Amino acid sequence: MREANSFDIFLLVLLGLIWGSSFFNIKIATYSYEPITLALVRVIFASAPLILLCKFKKIKIEAFSEEWKHYALIGLCNIAIPFILIAIGTSKINSYLAAMLMSTTPLSGTILAHFFTKNEKINIFKVIGVLVGFSGILFLFLDKIIINESNYIFALITILGSTFYSIGGILTIRIKNKGNENVTTSTTVWSLIFLFPMAIILEKPWQADPSLESTLSLLYLGIVATGLAWLIRFRILSVNGLVFQTQVAYLIPIFGVFFGYFLMDEVITWRVMISLSIIIFGIYIVKKNNKGLN
């Protein structure tokens, strides 16, 4: 892996911008689409470029190999479940709040990694980082303008979606020697297998009467925020490594707040800005002490 140059930094910022913009598009898409259908369309558009990438690079897709259970479980925990939970949560809370709550992934991941990995044990600095980060989340819940009796359950659902990303990440570590492109494509295929019958049976998407605005947002989520973003992520991982790529966690909530305020006219309180600063500082402490992510 090499040191990041200006183009690498540009790609990282672009990835943060794309993922940060996904939350207000999820919000708009939920106006017309049910959460499972929304997740399904995202995965369909993500699968196409991933499969083409593997074909182009002549990488064998091992989704249905002897280790199919690993790919299936990761596809369920790392893609299908969090995509659904995020859509459910974002439908009832501000889009920027969803971005901020999703940024807790490195914090919950640090806790899970301590118990389920050998090389990522927690230390006093990580404990401080986790406590600082989650204190920022707790401070958000004291802001009754943003989180109240009508939507706090949906805020918790969003945090649960973030936690499932962490669970999926821990599971992925067990098969990291299988290649990033293969693992991502194979797990995406399995998430498609899970989501397709669920959407057909539970939501009957062909009966939907979506608005053009929601449809455009859904297409953006599938093509740009999932398909293109994952290809950019591949490039960053292969050139600069995981440590550099994880720095995107700082950018996502910042862009999420920016888009929520300027494009969605969502209310930003002083508590939100303080919480954002605390959360980012907590993530910084945790990441600075994650020496095993290479």
Image (cartoon, rainbow, N blue to C red):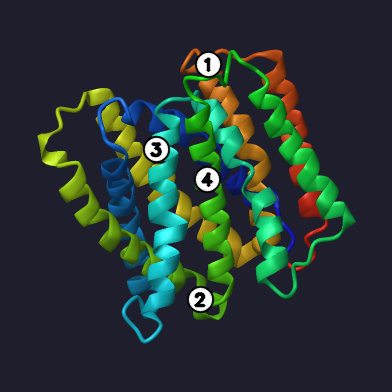
Q: Residue furthest bottom?
A: 66
Name which residue lies at 46% across and 17% down: 264
Helix, strand or loop at disc 2? loop
Residue 131 to residue 189: above or below: above
Q: Earlier in the sequence, mark 2 or mark 1?
A: 2
Q: CA distance from mark 3 to mark 1?
A: 21 Å
Where on the picture, by quarter, is residue 84? top left
For marks 2 and 3, give the CA distance.
29 Å
Distance from the alpha carbon under mark 2 to that under mark 1? 40 Å
Left or right: 137, with 165 as reference point? right
Rendered location of residue 136, percent (x, y):
73, 32
How much space separates mark 4 and mark 1, taking CA atoms?
27 Å
Q: Nearer the viewer, mark 2 or mark 3?
A: 3
Instruction: Name the residue tied to disc 1.
Output: 262
Q: Earlier in the sequence, mark 3 or mark 1?
A: 3
Judging by the rendered image, the residue that carries numbered circle 4 is 160
Q: Nearer the viewer, mark 4 or mark 1?
A: 4
Q: Earlier in the sequence, mark 4 or mark 1?
A: 4
Asked which quadrant contains residue 166, the reply is: bottom right
Please provide percent x and percent y for residue 131: 79, 43
Q: Secondary structure at mark 4?
A: helix
Left/right of residue 39 with respect to residue 92 in the rendered view: left
Q: Residues within 10 Å of mark 4 (few under 14, many from 20)?
A: many
Between 35 and 212, the one lying in front of the other is 35
Q: Is residue 133 left or right of residue 10?
A: right
